[in-house]
């Protein structure tokens, strides 16, 4: 058994009578590429919010490695190597792309409270940001305000911000949502090219992408874990076909 | 040198050029020219130095709000609490036998900073409307506390009998206001240099990011609360220095230094000039106070009518205030100049 990077133990989240997550457990081995699938409203984003600390679980615990992080704030979990992206683009509209990524790097390095040197004097961070943007084909956009970018490019900025934190665990909430198929493949090539020790959990609706990039798949239905397995096991499971793939063609 | 390193070396100038969109602390010629204006006023407009000092002091006050509102995005209708606290600190020192100006400023800054730090924990909670109400409430609390504590503050009669020593033991605070003007200008400039450095730094960048999208910041590993606490405390300290300057140069502290009107007018000045640009605070204050002086000379009762009209026009049609319009005009002119 390889080392565990991230573990969710019996996570529950209820709002009044509504159960968004019921007893959801998941274990990700270090370096695993894991897909989380399920119909709309299955509680996938809620699950990510519970893992990252945006929401507090009604019951259950979250572990990063051996450490119980259930009581830690979101930014403290980021400091322990867990980063996420957002399904609905969440950026800094009037900051330039370069500024945003430089900020993420400075935050990672603990330099963002420095007030006596200018941002431009942190040339190491600027260089790293530039390299990262080139890798994501955003080099030409570096100097532009984020809000002036086309939607597809903004999705890439979202990923650039996450990568700039150098995560050990990366949670991607529909990273390619709303961008053309050709570009979404590009996004996943970048993700697939990350170092092998980075553990990745991603939510994705495109089954081709899921089967191509995931080593294991979890299926969430109506807030509960229906099954976990290899892509083949999931694809051939009768229950999954019935509740999930049977409903999918509306995409 | 390896091939890779050589390529990296060749690529460096381009990367450095890319970094030019990032904030630097370099001074431009326009800025130098800007600061020569108040210096020239000292020599050319010696009849107006009293108004001039008031403008400089209020500009420092507006600058302190710009860090809080313009950069960190925390709206406040109670910033006068810290201005008044600084004013009373310096005034009480002067009244009770310690008239040394610079130590008075520093102590006023410390007292205001402490109050800012303590109240910041209430202010950083919630969103805009909550913050407006909380800051408004804190402002009212300070005002009534000073009103009630008349045995210390003089209450509605104000605090008089403030005696200041010579600045550096050399310059007496004269009736013509020469010392007061030069003193206020130097203090404003020093505070401005500090604020300028702050906003160009990574800390300043992180404040802008909090303003733009506070919910995204924790996902980068930043605690929004701790950033806002620091920004609010610094803003309070600078406001305290401004209040202390007013107390020291007028040798009087009125209850209105803590008043709601002072807080509200300050927001107006900042919005007129353009929030989140530092220079907007200075320009907006100067414009507001010169207009106030001129219009109230024409008609002492209705001058606020024109200020009100100007505010509505600026907010509706000139986003970013006077400096915002100036920026857009420059950009349009540049586009025309390039064929």
Image (tube, rainbow, N blue to C red):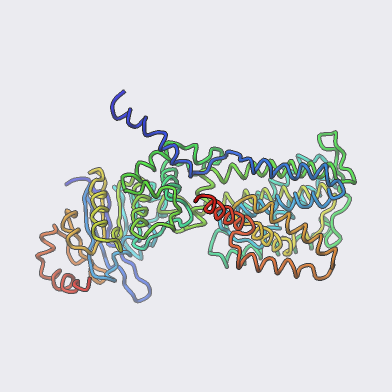
Residue at position x 57%, y 40% from top? Answer: B25
Compared to B228, does B28 lie above or below? above
Which image quadrant: the C terminus of chain A?
A: bottom left
Q: Residue B42's image quarter?
A: top right
Image coords of residue B161 (percent x, y): 89, 50
Number of numbered discs present?
0
Q: Is residue B12 found left or right of B2 in the rendered image? A: right
B168 up-or-down from B330: above or below: above
Q: Along the line of sight, which residue is nearer the eye, A158 or A42?
A: A158
Name the residue located 38 percent from the left edge and 60 percent from the top edge: A89
Tell me: B146 left or right of A83.
Answer: right
Residue B98 as seen in the image, left or right of residue B223: right
Is B306 in front, or is A226?
B306
- Between B211 and B280, the one lying in front of the other is B280
Residue A155, given in percent of the width and then of the height, sits at: 34, 57
Residue pictured at 76% horizontal, 68% vertical: B304
Q: Position of residue B69 (x, y in %)?
A: 60, 57
Position of residue B157 measured from the top left corner of the image (x, y, whole percent): 86, 60
Q: Look at 34% across and 32% down and name the residue there.
A: B8
Query: Residue B28 falls in which quadrant of the image?
Result: top right
Point out the residue furthest to the top here. B1
Could you tell whether B90 is left or right of A31 in the image?
Answer: right
Pick the residue in front: A230 or B12. B12
């Amino acid at each position: 058994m390889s080392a565990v990077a991230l573990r969710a133990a019996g996570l529950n989240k209820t709002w009044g009578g509504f159960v968004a997550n019921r007893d959801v457990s998941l274990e990700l081995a270090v370096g695993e590429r894991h897909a989380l699938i399920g119909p709309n409203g299955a509680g996938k984003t809620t699950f990510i919010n519970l893992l990252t600390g945006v929401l507090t679980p009604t019951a259950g615990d979250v572990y990063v490695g051996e450490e119980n992080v259930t009581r830690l704030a979101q930014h403290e979990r980021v400091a322990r190597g867990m980063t996420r992206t957002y399904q609905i683009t969440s950026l800094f509209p009037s900051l330039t792309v370069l500024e945003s990524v430089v900020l993420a790097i400075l935050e990672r390095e603990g330099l963002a409270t420095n007030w006596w040197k200018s941002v431009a004097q942190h040339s190491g961070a600027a260089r790293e940001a530039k390299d990262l943007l080139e890798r994501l084909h955003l080099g030409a956009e570096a100097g532009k305000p984020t809000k002036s970018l086309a939607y597809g490019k903004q999705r890439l900025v979202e990923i650039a911000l996450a990568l700039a934190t150098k995560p050990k665990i990366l949670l991607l909430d529909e990273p390619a949502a709303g961008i053309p198929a050709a570009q979404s493949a590009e996004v996943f090539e970048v993700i697939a090219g990350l170092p092998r020790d980075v553990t990745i959990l991603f939510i994705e609706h495109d089954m081709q992408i899921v089967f191509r990039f995931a080593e294991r798949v979890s299926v969430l239905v109506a807030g509960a874990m229906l099954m976990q397995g290899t892509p083949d096991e999931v694809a051939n499971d009768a229950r999954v076909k019935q509740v999930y793939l049977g409903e999918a063609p509306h995409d | 040198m390896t091939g890779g390193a050589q390529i990296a070396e060749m690529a460096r100038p381009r990367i450095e050029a890319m970094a030019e969109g990032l904030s630097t602390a370099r001074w431009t010629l326009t800025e130098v020219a800007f600061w020569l204006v108040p210096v020239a006023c000292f020599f050319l407009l010696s009849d107006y130095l009293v108004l001039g000092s008031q403008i400089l002091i209020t500009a420092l006050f507006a600058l302190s709000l710009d860090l809080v509102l313009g950069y960190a995005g925390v709206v406040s209708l109670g910033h006068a609490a810290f201005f008044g606290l600084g004013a009373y600190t310096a005034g009480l020192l002067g009244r009770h036998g310690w008239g040394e100006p610079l130590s008075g400023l520093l102590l006023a800054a410390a007292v205001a900073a402490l109050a800012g730090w303590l109240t910041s924990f209430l202010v950083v909670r919630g969103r805009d409307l909550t913050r407006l109400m909380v800051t408004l409430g804190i402002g009212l609390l300070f005002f009534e506390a000073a009103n009630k504590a008349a045995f210390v503050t003089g209450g509605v009669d104000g605090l008089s009998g403030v005696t200041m020593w010579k600045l550096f033991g050399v310059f007496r605070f004269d009736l013509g206001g020469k010392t007061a003007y030069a003193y206020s200008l130097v203090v404003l400039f020093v505070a401005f240099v500090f604020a300028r450095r702050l906003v160009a730094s990574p800390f300043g960048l992180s404040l802008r990011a909090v303003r733009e999208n506070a919910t995204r910041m924790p996902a980068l590993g930043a605690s929004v609360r701790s950033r806002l606490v620091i920004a609010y405390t610094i803003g309070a300290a600078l406001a305290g220095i401004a209040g202390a300057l007013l107390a020291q140069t007028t040798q009087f502290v009125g209850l209105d230094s803590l008043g709601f009107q002072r807080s509200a007018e300050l927001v107006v000045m900042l919005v007129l000039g353009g929030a989140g640009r530092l220079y907007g605070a200075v320009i907006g204050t100067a414009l507001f106070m010169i207009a106030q002086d001129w219009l109230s000379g024409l008609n002492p009762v209705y001058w606020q009518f024109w200020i009100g009209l100007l505010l509505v026009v600026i907010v509706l049609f000139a986003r970013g205030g006077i400096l915002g319009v100036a920026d857009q005009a420059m950009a349009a002119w540049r586009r025309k100049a390039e064929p």
